[in-house]
Amino acid sequence: MSFDLNFIGILIGAIMASSVPLILAASGELITERSGVLNLGVEGMMIIGAISGFALMVVTDNLFFAVVGSMLSGLILSLIFGLLTQSLLTNHVATGLALTIFGIGMSAMIGKNFVGIPGKEFPLLFLNLKESIPFLGPIFFGHSIILYFAFGLPFLTNYFLKKTKTGLIIRAVGDSPTSASNQGINVTLVRYSCILYGGAMCGLAGAYLSLIYTPQWIENMTGGRGWIALALVVFATWSPIKVLIGALIFGGITILQLHMQAVGLRIPVQLLSALPYIMTIIVLVVISRDSRKIKLNTPTSLGQIFYKEK
Amino acid sequence: MNTKLKVSEISKIYPGCIANDKVSLEFGSGKIYALLGENGAGKSTLVKILSGVVKPDEGEVFLNDESIKLNSPLDAKKNNIGMVFQHFNLFETLSVFENLSIDSDKKDKDLRVLVDSILKKYNFKIDLDIPVLNLSAGQKQKVEIIRCLIRNPKVLIMDEPTSVLTEQETDDLFISLKQFSKDGILIIYITHKLKEVLSLCDEVAVMRKGKVVSVSNTIDEKIESLANKMVGENLNTIKKKINNFKNSKEILKISNLSFKSDDPYETNLNNLNLSLKKGECLGIAGISGNGQNELFQILSGEIITEGTSIMFRNKEIGKLNPRERREYLMAFSPEDRISQAAVPELKIYENVALNNFKSSNFFEKGLVNEKKIKEHSKKILSNFSVNTDNVELKSQFLSGGNLQKLIIGRELITSPELLVCFNPTWGLDVGAINYIHETLIQINEQGKSSILISTDNDELLKLSDRICVIYKGKLSKIMNADTVTAEKLGILMGGGSID
């Protein structure tokens, strides 16, 4: 019995690890969207974060630089998005799509020289506790610092949006940029900040993949996680806590269906692979079906270009 | 404390229109000032300049004899100038308190005490913790006012505040404004409603075409004198001579027309019968929501019915869509100018092309002939006195009156045999209303017919040759206009009967 429990603990630990990139990217994008900006470049920023992190790790042999560098690279990519959409007033959707295509291509180009190089071991915390406590040990201990950060982030984001003045200003800008501007709020500055923050978080999500989750560089290694993160934000109706739930369900079913495939259940593999997507959407739609709450959480100006009257 | 506000030689030019032309005005605290003018006279621009939203091209603003720079809304706030816009600047999804706190440097706790004291002092009843989207228009306006009061304003500017209010809410607002004025706040009240000026304000400045044309005490003014100043000419009272159409040809006949809607919010129409003669205006009165929308859509072809139920110039048109009906020389002016009649984001000439997109003049071999459309649009603008000659202007920048002139002009320039209009003067100022009324009388004089669906009884009595009332989707007996009084209409509109 104790063996089984411990196995379940390890399984839960694995599920948590697999949902980290989704939580990070979705939390970042959530802040961006709450300010009224729709950045579809999440996938692109993640993959650029992944390759920059990995390349910096190889070149500098320093994981700290690698992590910070990946965040910076995501931030720089989002800065391009900001310049285009906020200063040159281009369409959010088209610009975001271009950003993703650019990111994937760019990462493949940089990454050519880094294929096949083994990654470096990322320090995991409380390893002794993980082994000494059955069941709970593998759940709560033996993870990287980024995982702990990721699991705290939705709660911090929630607090930030609901309880702080800056959070209030971001929500106000997302609700009505014109009103905000008439109230003397610098809409462009607020939106730029949110875009850059989102970019940095996507970069970090990418670094988690290439430095910790599967410590190596593989072309296209984000594998659509950026799009999942985007979908999570929408289906979680812009609520950080629901993003966390959605990411866990997605990660959970991904891992479980892999085990089911391994066991050799007589269910078509394609159906099993589709399961995480279907279940995540169903669960999020069900827990978010309060239409009044959706209306209150949705950034009314999402994706709209804002220009100031002069 | 006394406050003096002075604007000096303010000018602001937009492409195609001079919004403010060397405007100079002086205000002092303890009084309520009216800024009166038609839509598009430049009041709103002046107010946007005073609140720092728009920068003037020339001119200065003085507060207590000191020149102040108003480069942003923050500057206006710093100078204690408060502003309640016509279109609310609230965040709908945030709570009332969040809307107030976003603007304040105070701690939440202190702010709540302050807001509570304001609510108490002026007897406002608003729940601070519900989202703004759950408030009525009157309550939203109070939130805007509280937002200004938090900052101890010296000047409070109200831009067309009653356009969204009920009568009761308007009365409440006036009581509050008088109270603020007593407390030493200088109030500038922007409006195009003459009655409000006389009942609320001490002094009145009239603006026309971007200029200040008169400043006077309201005691010395009457509705007529203000109206004339506002429009800039003696408004002649229009009177239509009622004709006898016994020998005229019948142009439209609706027989036994019923409509049953799947949408629970729509009204079913029940066995309608009417006929219209050449050169005649038929008025259809009623309280809104009694089937006017559906009737208009049936006439315009947005709702399609049996072919035989509507005969227009001896042709069955019930099954035709709006474009096909236009080819038979019908024309339509819907109630909602912004979302039904025009596309606000499109330029004027593009909107003109829209209702005529089959015309071979405008489109050749699938290509747009911009030159011809623009010429045609210019003709509409000048023939129908639209206050711009720039056909490249986006329609959303036209005031309501000018947009309505454009829409009616677009319909009439093809000389249709029948014009169906639905509340054509809704929300317009005196000058524009007068113009539209004159135009509608003119087309009857030219032997064209019209159907006027309206909720404004004065308008109906002024323009119609015959009138009937729609009530719960049923039409009353059609009466000659000279036998109808406002009283009779009132009874029928409420579902009563007269004999």
Image (spheres, coloured by chain):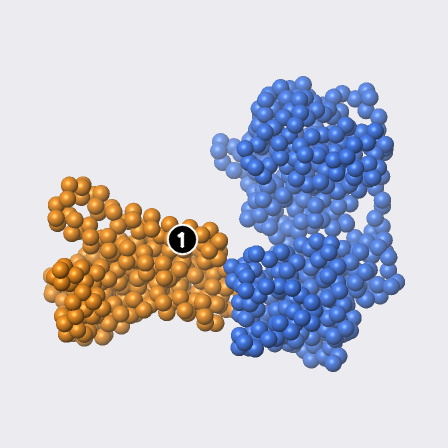
Chain colours: A orange, B blue
Q: Answer with left or right where residue B240 lies relative to residue B362.
A: right
| Picture layout, residue A227 above or below residue B314 | below
Q: How many marks?
A: 1
Residue B6, image quadrant: bottom right
Residue farthest toward the front in the current orientation of the protein: A1
- Horizontal and vertical percent for residue B190? 72, 61
The answer to whether residue A64 is seen in the rendering is yes
The answer to whether residue A52 is seen in the rendering is no
Element class at badge 1: loop
Residue at the image position 23 percent from the left and 74 percent from the top: A65
Residue at the image position 24 percent from the left and 55 percent from the top: A252
Residue A13, image quadrant: bottom left
Looking at this view, is B52 or B195 the one in front? Answer: B195
Looking at this view, is A225 or B65 the one in front? Answer: A225
| Quadrant (top left, top right, bottom left, bottom right) of the C terminus of chain B | top right
Residue at the image position 75 percent from the left and 59 percent from the top: B171
Residue at the image position 71 percent from the left and 49 percent from the top: B428
Q: Which residue is mark 1?
A: A288
Disc 1 residue crowd, few under 14, some 14–19, many 20+, Cα 10 Å: some
| Quadrant (top left, top right, bottom left, bottom right) of the N terminus of chain B | bottom right
Q: Answer with left or right where residue B99 lies relative to residue B253.
A: left
Residue farthest toward the right in the current orientation of the protein: B220
Q: Residue type at mark 1?
A: Ser
- Horizontal and vertical percent for residue B283? 75, 34
| Picture layout, residue B391 above or below residue A3 | above
Looking at this view, is B198 or A123 the one in front? Answer: A123
Looking at this view, is B15 or B325 the one in front? Answer: B325
Q: Answer with left or right where residue B111 lies relative to residue B212.
A: left
